[in-house]
Amino acid sequence: MAGSSFDFLSGTMATASYRSDYIRLTHLRRLYSGVLFLVLVLLFFGGFYTADSRNAGGFFDGLDSFFDFPAEVLGEAWSEIDGLPTLLWHYLPSLLETVNIAAVATLIGAIIGLLLSLFSTRGLAFWPRGIPLFRRSMDIMRAVPEIVIALVLIFIMGAGPIPAMIAIAIHTSGALGKLFSEVNENCDMKPVDGLASVGASWGQRMWFGVFPQVVQNYFSYALLRFEINIRASAILGFVGAGGIGYDLRNTISWGKGRYDDATAIFILLFLTIVLVDQLSSVLRNRV
Amino acid sequence: MMTGTQSPDLRRQSLAAIKRRSLLCFAIPGVILAYLVYVFFAFEVRDTLEDVKLDNAAILVGDSYSYKTEVSHNNRSGHYVVAIEGEKKGRYAPSAHPAWVAIDGENADIDLTDGYRVIIRDREVTFTIPGYGQIVALPTRRGVEVDLPDGPLPSWINLSKTRLNVKTPNGRISVTKAKTTIFRYFFGWELFWFTLDSPYNGLGITELVSLALSNERNENGQTHALAIFLDFWFNPMWRHGEVAWALVETVLMAFLGTIGAACLALPLGFLSARNFAPSLIGRFGLRRLFDFLRGVDGLIWTVILSRAFGPGPMTGALAILITDTGTFGKMFSEALENVDDKQIEGLKSTGASPVSQNRFGVIPQITPVLLSQILYYLESNTRSATIIGAIVGGGIGLLLTQAIITQKDWEEVTYYIILIVVMVFIMDSLSGWLRRRLIKGESTAP
């Protein structure tokens, strides 16, 4: 760009040097990208063979039998198709528990995340010197995988929905706290300053100055999180935290004869996730 | 400008709007509260809180920073065993007992510091506790005969006909007719670097470094540096080598899954973006495929795949790959639909081929978006790989669940948790760093 505009003024010599410079840089850049790409490809295939050799069944053997298990499950479910509505009804309470775990965890996580985000946004913080502290604590809450907290809590509290709920809520507070504080950083400070000038307290400044600006973004982030949390709550159930995941583990590990149950659970879980997915995108678009 | 006739109407309208708003402001917290109350009963919160086993929590916390050494005396054979955590792997050789244990044939003198002392003479156990007195216990054929100082029974002594348990801050003893065991607690993680059978156990860091740097060889002809590493790496109690492999497996699952999904999703994204799709039917089918892949959820994919591929990291990687192909396919096609047509038209006007149009007109526009999404998922999949590993039986997730299920080695659980958090932190900062370098740096770099 620069080369062509200077072209008229300084003659062809300068253009040639710009041109060669540009081409040299482009080649250098292509070289870097190429090396990076090569490294990535090598890592990928190296990783593939490592993972394959450490797996009980090989990748290519598994591909052949990929559809065996679904076929077996579906075959058995098909032969007992009449019982399916009853089974769907039977597992509905567990599904409700899974959804409840996700909903409560999102709710509590959003409330805690909201407070943490207000405490850790520059310009809004109640105690500005504590900002790094709250940021780090959010990082830690996000970093600890849910399964760690859930398993430890199951040991202390016994199996049930509450350990999963707490584990997901902790992770959600960290994740939403970070997203919320990014939203807060973009909010207009004029209403807050105006409220401060008339002597509003910190709580009043947040409630009347910040919330009206951010509440819609908060809402759509929380909805997205709810979707993620339903999956998390189902998977935590599988390691013993109750809900539909727990039932799935039981039906699967009992082996033959319970695959119609497993199919019912698959269907319920699939429908729920698709439903929440659609619902949340509709709601988010309306906001 | 408002006229006089309009203003009362407007006023009524706005008052109604405000009223509706404020009603909503009260209704939303009310609904949330009602929901929480419902959940309080649905989850049986009160029963769960009553069932909380604080003892378990105390064991967990205590074990995470301390370990115990057991001195046990078999009251029938008269043999003594001194072992860390009571494990075979932590057993002291009879000739090399720690200094606070003095054993002479059938008799023992065990120093629990601060004046706490246990003496065993011919099965008879005498436990001296400063500020309380002496407890004498004699295991017999029928049970345990105990002689306590006068006064009420303190809560830290647990006594029955067949068993005596005394818990003090300096140590704990338990006497039954078969066995007398004394536990002394120490701060830290036991034998973390080397087990007792290693010649390097108990050496200080300076000694180890000077040994490692020296050219001397040990009896097996290995250099000390190698032997030190091997003893640490194959430490039978902590299994550092296996743990390191488990961490690699976990990261590998996330890496293979994410990158594989991205590679599959890029062409599929082109085929399902409105402005690039060759056929509408194919686009519709692909869209539904993405929805299906995402909707079936990682859990179900994991379950299905572990039947076909058996336990291991490959199964976990495939589960992540399949789920994320759906997610990436949707995201990439949305990113492609948002590209600016001007650059493509510009290239077209110079007579560029369709491949060149995409290579120079489209790819540079979507690369930053795609890269940041891929890196974000890589980071979040590292966490998912932990839990997927617990289900498919691979990686650090498996080690963690196993250690928790045995309910014994909480120091190992703590170790794994710390490693997991460090791993996630490293992946977090790595992906953040890459994102900054590759995306923001792109405009300034050559």
Image (spheres, coloured by chain):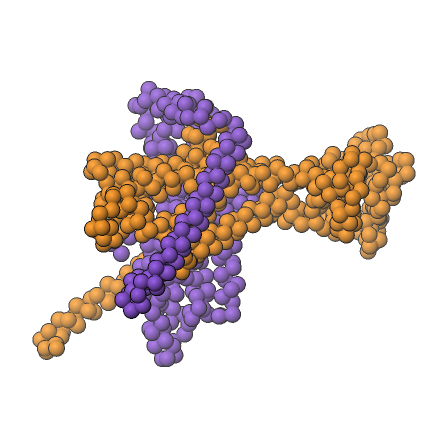
- Residue A114 at x, y percent in the picture: 41, 60
The quadrant in which the C terminus of chain B is found is: bottom left
- Residue at far right of view: B104
Where A263 falls versus B419 (above or below)? above
Residue A193 lies, with reference to residue A64, above or below; the image says: below
Between B319 and B170, the one nearer to me in the picture: B319
* Residue A227 visible in the shown view: yes
Question: Which residue in the rendered view is the most extreme toward the bottom?
Answer: A198
**In this image, B69 relative to A212: left or right?**
right
Residue visible at 85% across and 32% down? B78
Counting the numbered discs, the total is 0
Chain that the image shows in orange: B
Q: Residue at x 37, y 54 (%)?
A: A23
Q: Using residue B216 as the reference point, say whether residue B1 is left or right of it.
A: left
Residue toward you, A10 or B175: A10
Residue B158 in sight: no
**Residue at (73% x, 35% y) in the render:** B89
Q: Residue at x 80, y 38 (%)?
A: B218
Measured as percent of width and height from the top left, residue B102 is found at 87, 43
Q: Position of residue A257 (x, y in %)?
A: 42, 21
Nearer to me, B46 or A170:
A170
Q: According to the colouring, which chain is purple?
A: A
Residue B8: x and y, percent? 13, 74
Q: Farthest residue to the top: give it.
A: A79
Q: Quarter of the image for the N terminus of chain B: give it.
A: bottom left
